[in-house]
Image (tube, coloured by chain):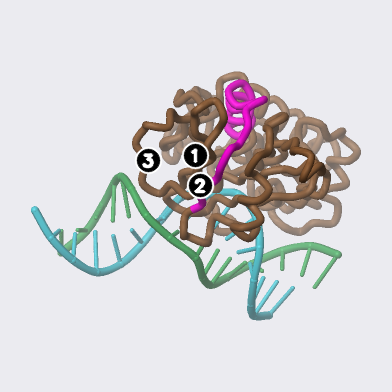
Chain colours: A brown, B green, C cyan
Amino acid sequence: MPELPEVETIARGLAKRVTGDLIESVWLGQKKEPLKSPATEIAATLEHSCIASVRRMGKHIVFDLVRNASKPKPAQWIVHLGMTGRLQVCAAQDEIAKHTHAILKLKSGRELRFVDPRRFGRLSVAQAGDFAAAGVEPLEVDLDRFITLFRGRKTPIKSALLNQKLLRGVGNIYADESLFRAGIRPRRRATTIPRERLGKLLTAVKEVLKEAIALGGSSVSDYVNADGERGFFQLQHCVYGREAEPCLVCKTSIKRVVIGGRSSHYCPRCQK
DNA sequence: ACTATTTCCTGGATGC
DNA sequence: TGCATCCAGGAAATAG
């Protein structure tokens, strides 16, 4: 389940491999769910465009496209991987995986393929600059801005952290790990948390995300980066996926509860 | 303006 | 072995 660190890792890997390549043609599958923009528009935008750069915005991967004289306006291809989406750089003769929804033929002879069994991923195109994901980047936000995000919100802090309109890129794993490090229970109402404690939370969020990026993300199910390699941050998880195991700090049994439909893990002793 | 709930999907795990 | 059922989860849609 790619969250910010995984998407960052994938975007960096893709940037290394496909920057400067030219998209010669595009095939799109028949399933409509993965496409947010009309298929004809996606194909027309991608074909004959050069990939100028690949970067992450929240949980989205943005391909900046430079185009030829007949279509001079720069555009963007925006990919959200959802739960199980993958972007593979393949040799043209490589077997086409089940659940392949898009294939971009590149001038280098390789193919960039979008594979997504669960079809929660989304593909779209936009004119350069038109795509503005809501919310602030957690690695860039300052404390004052961070505090205002939660002002007056009665929702549990866990739900607020997952709300992409507030903060973009934090998902279930990193929300739980950040709350553990900050000593805050996931059900705690956001508006009741004092400024000082929100400061701890922001520090925790940034540390967790940076450490996870450094380790190539968390591979909890089948996540692999653009080079097919697993991440290693799952080895650092203190609470996520550790229900009934002892807290690494105080040995208390880790609890799992459901908040807003999301499983949430915490230490009842370390988190208040 | 918020918040809570439901919906979309398939593969893997579980239960009988 | 086979079949049914449940669960995971991001974000959009819907309802309150």
* Classed neighbour count for the residue bearing mark 1: other residues with Cα under 10 Å, few (<14), some (14–19), many (≥20): many
Does A25 lie within the magenta span?
Answer: yes
Labels 1 and 3 in the same subunit:
yes
B5 up-or-down from A66: above or below: below
Report the residue marked by disc 2: A102
Labels 2 and 1 in the same subunit:
yes
Disc 3 to disc 2: CB gap under 8 Å: no
Q: CA distance from mark 3 to mark 2?
A: 11 Å
Q: In the picture, residue A77 is in which quadrant?
A: top right
Q: Is residue A204 visible?
A: no
Of mark 2 and mark 1, the one earlier in the sequence is 2
Report the residue marked by disc 3: A96
Does A218 lie within the magenta span?
Answer: no
User: Where residue A175 is drawn, which disc sits there?
Assistant: none
As shown in the figure, which amino acid type bears the numbered disc 3?
Ile
Q: CA distance from mark 2 to mark 1?
A: 6 Å
Identify the residue at the far front of this view: A70
Report the residue marked by disc 1: A113
Helix, strand or loop under label 3? loop
| Position of residue A205 in the picture relative to residue A254 (left or right) | right
